[in-house]
Amino acid sequence: FGVTHAVRGADLEASTSAQYYLAECLGASSFLPIQFFHHPLLLDEKGEKLSKSAGSEAVNTIKEGGDGHQEILKATAQWLGLPEDRKYSAAGDLLNAIELP
């Protein structure tokens, strides 16, 4: 599908390693070049992981609730070490700002 990068929660790091190993064993060459970035987990006000499977509010609902979209982009920029004073209007802006190896 042309996927070059995948962003996942830090709780999936071990899973990514296992999937990479399986891809190697199965000769799934399209999976091997994908670069993975594991971000710190998103937590709610109680310190619990935001997760649809745990019944947390979906990110789409947060985005629809006003300025939530900007808050998500700003938090992501902070995690990536990008300038906080820059306004990111879309996830693509974040990807363009990242210097990847």
Image (cartoon, rainbow, N blue to C red):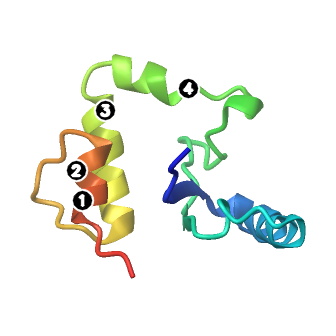
* Of labels 2 and 4, the one closer to you: 2
Observer-nearest of 6 and 8: 6
Which residue position holds label 1?
96
Going from N to C along the chain, the mark reached first, 2 or 3, is: 3
Disc nearer the start of the sequence (2/4): 4
Mark 1 and mark 3: span between their CA atoms? Answer: 18 Å
Mark positioned earlier in the residue sequence (3 or 4): 4
- Quarter occupied by residue 33: bottom right
Q: Is 87 positioned to the left or the right of 10 in the image?
A: left
Q: Residues within 10 Å of mark 3 (few under 14, many from 20)?
A: some
Disc 2: which residue: 93
Q: State how many labels appear.
A: 4
- Looking at the image, tell me whether mark 4 or mark 1 is earlier in sequence order: 4
Q: What secondary structure is marked by label 2?
A: helix
Report the residue marked by disc 4.
58
Residue at 71 percent across and 26 percent down: it is 55
